[in-house]
Amino acid sequence: MALAVAVPIMIQNGITNAVAMLDNIMVGAVGTVQMTGVSIANTLMFVFNLTVFGAVSGAGIFGAQFIGKGDHDGVRYAMRFKLMICALLALLGIGIFRFFGDDLIRLYLTGQGQADQIEASLRYGKSYLDIMLVGIVPFVLVQCYTSTLRESGQTVVPMVAGLSAMLVNLLGNWLLIFGRLGLPELGADGAAIATVVSRFVEALIVMVWSHCHADAHPCMRGLYKSMRIPLRLAGKIAAKGLPLIINEALWAGSVALLNQCYSIRSYDVVAAINISTTISNVLNVAFLAMGNAIGIIIGQMLGAGELEKAKETDVKLIVFSEMLCLIFGTALAAVSGVFPKLYNTTEEIRSLASTFILISAALMPVCSYSNAAYFTLRCGGKTLVTLLFDSVFQCAVVAPVAFVLSRFTTLPIVPLYICCQGLELIKCIVGFVMIRSGVWLQNIVKEEATS
């Protein structure tokens, strides 16, 4: 059951991250300066993307439990809530990146480096970011639709859409980054254009399929007939969802701050972390997909009132996630010396990237457990607890440690990186205690009226 849900999600996320990796390698083949600018722009987009994820996740808690309950009206209302909140976030994101993009990118270009390299990276990063803004609308639509399909157990269609987007993106990268078949050689801008086009393709596939299969997914019937949501339900979704939006925004923001702290050591660190993160994201899909599977499977059990079964199943899924991470972590360590050689950059950057990759491989089981604990607490509606567990910890502990060590000590980048990333162990301990306590075992839609 876990594999039936998790494997398509792994494949879709793997495809998405593989596309990002190929995108990154192709831009890296042009040179370090363009790669650095693009990586900074993607760091900023990462904050927006996770905020959207938090927005759909809040309503998704209700969606999964309504599906377990068999209430299609409830699922439809949850979907409408996703669409409205994501529309607001899209407008906000476009406004911030359009008017403050230069200032945000400059924050990552304060380390030691040549002035001409820094200015060039700023120029490439801003141009890339401006083009990516066009893809925000299809991106949020894909998140709304695919999250609802996944909550109902339909994970194959989002996977197929993701695969189609990958092929479009890959072809677009080849054509536009390097100027093939008579097209202009656009470098980083070509990568952005290809990504935007692929997002429109993915959105079209998911939306058309969903509405053409309304018999299997009744929540799609009459979805846009009105945007009405019962006031009481909207209030409950907002109350549960707001902590998740804040959580994802703060967590992503703290990760962005963490990378900015690392960048203070040198210009080379930005490129090395970009290379490390690119390959780590591809292999991290195992535990991230298992987290989604936990949220879906356990959420449906809680909605059906099967609390004891949910508790037993959760333990098995967490153990299974850890087993997968031993395999994927070993694979990540195995490619640590090879992957950085794909980039047209200096040997110093390659060596530093290899070290970061090995550290990420060693910490993968730790990140897996904290991720599983997060989704376990979340699917029971404990969104305020997950806010404290996830982003508050990141902002109150990890970010201050990184800030102090990077600015007030001369600690080299590798031990600095280990100190900051290793703090994830504290979350594992807290998560273990909270899961054992059973505070998350709740059916939040048992008495919920949706009419």
Image (cartoon, rainbow, N blue to C red):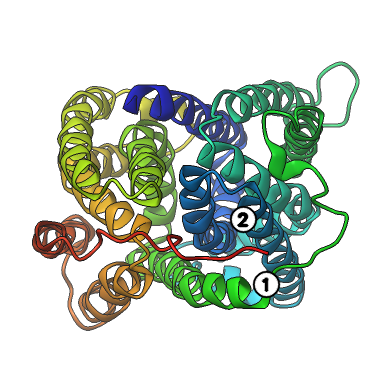
Residue at position x 51%, y 75% in the image: 242
Residue 352 in percent (x, y) is at 28, 44
Quarter of the image with the N terminus is top left
Q: Is residue 98 above or below residue 32?
A: below
| Foreground residue among 117 and 148 | 148
Q: Which residue is tagged 2? A: 74
Residue at position x 59%, y 63% in the image: 48
Please tell me in which quadrant of the rendered image residue 124 appears: bottom right
Residue 295 in percent (x, y) is at 38, 47
**Secondary structure of residue under mark 1:** helix
Check disc 1: other Cα within 10 Å, few if <14, some if 14-19, many if 20+.
Answer: some
Residue 85 in percent (x, y) is at 68, 68
Task: Say what amino acid the circle numbered 2 marks.
Answer: Gly
Q: Is residue 175 above or below residue 422?
A: above
As measured in the structure, the alpha-carbon distance from the residue carrying label 2 to the one carrying label 1 is: 43 Å
Along the horizontal axis of the image, is 153 left or right of 136? left
| Foreground residue among 315 and 235 | 235
Task: Say what amino acid the circle numbered 1 marks.
Answer: Asp
Check disc 2: other Cα within 10 Å, few if <14, some if 14-19, many if 20+.
Answer: many
Q: Which residue is tagged 1? A: 102
| Foreground residue among 112 and 318 | 318
Quarter of the image with the C terminus is bottom right
Query: Most extreme residue toward the top, as rendered?
Result: 181
Residue at position x 81%, y 19% in the image: 180
Q: Is residue 145 above or below residue 235?
A: above
Residue at position x 48%, y 47% in the image: 69
Q: Earlier in the sequence, mark 2 or mark 1?
A: 2
Residue 188 in sight from this viewpoint: no
